Image (spheres, coloured by chain):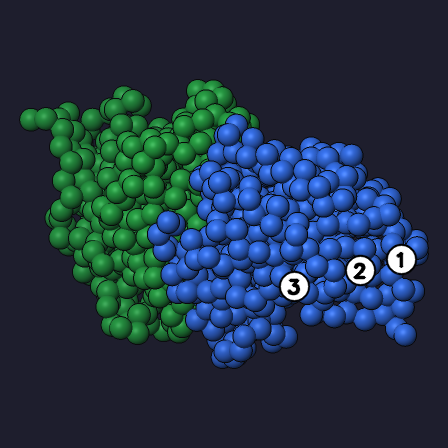
Chain colours: A green, B blue
């Protein structure tokens, strides 16, 4: 048997994980809004990556603290409310949620402490969570936990906000160990609820340090380079748990590759479900003095409203790309910049190429390649166009 | 007589300046697209401020060179083409334009050299200018130069791109000296042609150094703080010429004040004519550790697509403001941030204030005040909402 990637399986694809998703009544719509992922052991290694926003939601502050132990038994996630900018009371709500889950799991037969539980929330910033609905639902969801794949899919549904489809991915190694994952929409893609939540599971034998290394390497080139409007949520969280249930201890390289594969697949699914998006855009910069400067230029172009509106109009307006590049605080030779759209050169040595205005960008996918000719640094950022639907999606009244 | 500001007069309001505006045929529409402002002396002091974009249009490179002398006899401006990213040939076109004007002015009786002429262009990036139409028009526009106010208004019309009205302003000092100015639309406000061109004139007696100081002080707090999408054109240019025709030598303070008054008035006119804009927004940040950090935060909020789309929807979504503040690379106390909309507190100590979701933002003007409580630094940035019309305006095919 060879390794393979499956989209219909998620966090319960690896051995020794249970999950569930239910409607707790946090969402006015009555849709599923509470998810649980439980690690049944025998090991409980864990690692996490969190938002770089200085304004962090209560669940982020809580989970960062918990993750310091490198040890996690469960993650509970809610949609329908971000619990961000809710002050001390909001933090107490998160703490209370972890304590209630710990008690429920202990009653259920799995001795657990609140300090072994991570909490994730997504939704509108600034409102307290309806604890009167959340608390009883915690006991309910523990009862609901099925084994098998379906529990993972239910969980993936329960964390959806403006997502139109759940996002799951599972990597099965030919060496008989597995990595599974689920993600919810946004990232920067549905910015009205701009939080990206990702939970990864694996039955590989791995230390917290190994998981941390694999996770940081993977997120750096996947979720971190999905950039639609430069916004960074107060709640972004990516977690990974390992239980060693497969009995297999893969090399760091194999672990890195598997975690990257699942993250890259989930990132692509986030992009594919982007709301208000009519174009999927990849901005690749080459020939910068360093990878960091290549990334700075790629982000400057990916975030430029004029470039994004032009792409929405299928307009090969390469001049806007050069103007955006010129704003980036990096080393440039303003006379040597080259740009191509979908492989068609539109600008050479900072001057328009023949036929540049006639390049057809009417398709859904647009590749923008920018060559700076000042070094060897390269970076790619995924982004989208700026459409009427984006404005519509994000101008609707929040309540 | 006391000092006064008049909107119906521009660059020809001061003594000793002539101007004209004609249709040279550069614009396919046949609308006026060539403007000329002539300083008749006796002095020819001048200063300029140019785009910080590393990719600079040919006319910017030319005018920066010319301004090193601190001496200017005339400025010729065209709309209908930016002459940016046009390579060596584009620079030769600008040089040729200055030489042709110098010859025409000399024939007309004003001995002039190409090195005494600044050139400004605005329009689509990447196309060469139709020199076959521009050259004969240069002789024509010199003949057209009238004295009096009307010439200035014709010039203000000829530099319009997506502007719907010409922008003029004139300050008449009670001490019998004057400052006049004209501006064209964009700044960041009509980003499909994102160039801001401003020409100021004064009959005060002033050295190039005095003009430079006054101009930099004024632009720093006016045009530099008009920020709709963070874009910075390849062609942005602000020029000032002084001829001393009034015989009055104002103090630096008086000169600074007069130049600021005209720049501030023109900046307000640019904002008022912003296309695709339904809200005029002022983002004020107080309590930062420095003015620079206050400005960094104000720009981060003013450029945030989520904040701007929420304002378009008249949504008092203060959570997005806090999320945007949190992204800014500045000193913050994440628990002490306060936000108010039009004077209504919506967030105190980073937590929602009672009634925050009910604040009425349906009006055209929105004041966002952000108090960081970490220092004394303050800054204000003018911006706009992100509307359907903005997307429409900027997604239309460039040709």
Q: Is residue A133 above or below residue A199?
A: below
* SS for dot 2: loop
Sooner in the amino-acid sequence: mark 1 or mark 3: 3
Which of B69/B157 is in front? B157
Q: Chain of mark 1?
A: B
- Front-most of B310 and A367? A367
Query: Which residue occupies 13% across, 32% down?
Result: A4
Q: What residue is at 46 percent from the left and 31 percent from the top?
A: A350
User: Is residue B319 in sight in this rendering?
Assistant: no
Q: Which mark is residue B14?
A: 2
Q: Crowdedness of circle 2 by 10 Å Cα count: few (<14), some, many (20+)?
A: many
- Rendered location of residue B232, percent (x, y): 55, 46
Q: Which residue is mark 3?
A: B153
Question: Residue A109 appears at what percent x and percent y?
Answer: 23, 53
Check if mark 2's residue and mark 1's residue have beta carbons within 8 Å. yes
Q: Are marks 1 and 3 on the same chain?
A: yes
**Chain for mark 3?**
B
User: How far apart, in angstroms, are the residues tagged by discs 3 and 2?
Assistant: 13 Å
What residue did someone put label 1 on? B246
Q: Is residue A363 left or right of residue B141?
A: left
User: In the rendered view, does B305 fall on the left or right side of A388?
Assistant: right
Q: Earlier in the sequence, mark 3 or mark 2?
A: 2
Label 1 element class: loop
The answer to whether the residue labelled 1 contacts the one labelled 3, judged by CB atoms less than 8 Å apart, is no
- Give the class, few, some or many, for how many residues have Cα within 10 Å of label 3's Cα (few <14, many ≥20): many
Q: Are marks 2 and 1 on the same chain?
A: yes
């Amino acid at each position: 048997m060879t390794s393979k990637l499956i989209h219909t399986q998620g966090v319960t694809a690896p051995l020794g994980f249970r999950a569930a998703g239910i409607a707790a009544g946090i969402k006015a719509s009555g849709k599923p809004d509470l998810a649980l992922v439980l690690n049944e052991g025998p090991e409980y290694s864990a690692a996490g990556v969190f938002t770089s926003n200085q304004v962090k939601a209560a669940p982020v502050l809580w989970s960062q603290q918990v993750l310091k132990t490198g040890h996690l038994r469960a993650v509970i996630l809610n949609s329908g409310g971000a619990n961000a900018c809710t002050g001390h009371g909001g933090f107490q709500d998160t703490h209370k949620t972890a304590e209630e889950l710990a008690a429920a799991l202990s009653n259920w037969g799995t001795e657990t402490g609140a300090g072994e539980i991570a909490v994730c929330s997504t939704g509108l910033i600034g409102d307290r969570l309806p604890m009167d609905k959340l608390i009883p639902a915690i006991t309910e969801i523990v009862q609901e936990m099925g084994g098998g794949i379906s529990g993972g899919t239910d969980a993936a549904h329960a964390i959806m906000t403006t997502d139109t489809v759940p996002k799951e991915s599972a990597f099965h190694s030919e060496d008989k160990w597995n990595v599974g994952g689920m993600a919810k929409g946004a990232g920067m893609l549905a910015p009205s609820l701009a939080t990206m939540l990702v939970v990864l599971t694996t039955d590989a034998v791995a230390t917290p340090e190994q998981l941390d290394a694999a996770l940081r390497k993977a997120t750096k080139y996947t979720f971190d380079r999905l950039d639609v409007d430069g916004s960074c949520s107060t709640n972004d969280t990516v977690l990974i748990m390992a239980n060693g249930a497969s009995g297999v201890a893969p090399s760091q390289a194999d672990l890195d590759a598997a975690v990257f594969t699942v993250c890259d697949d989930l990132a692509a699914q986030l992009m594919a479900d982007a709301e208000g998006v009519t174009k999927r855009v990849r901005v690749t910069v080459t020939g910068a003095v360093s990878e960091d400067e290549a990334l700075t230029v790629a982000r400057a172009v990916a975030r430029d409203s004029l470039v994004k509106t032009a792409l929405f109009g299928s307009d090969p307006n390469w001049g806007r790309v050069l103007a955006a590049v010129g704003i980036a605080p990096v080393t440039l030779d303003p006379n040597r910049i080259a740009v191509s759209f979908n492989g068609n050169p539109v600008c050479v040595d900072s001057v328009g190429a023949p036929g540049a205005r006639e390049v057809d960008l009417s398709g859904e996918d647009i590749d923008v390649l920018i060559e700076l000719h000042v070094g060897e640094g390269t970076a790619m950022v995924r982004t989208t166009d700026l459409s009427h639907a984006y404005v519509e999606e994000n101008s609707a009244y929040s309540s």
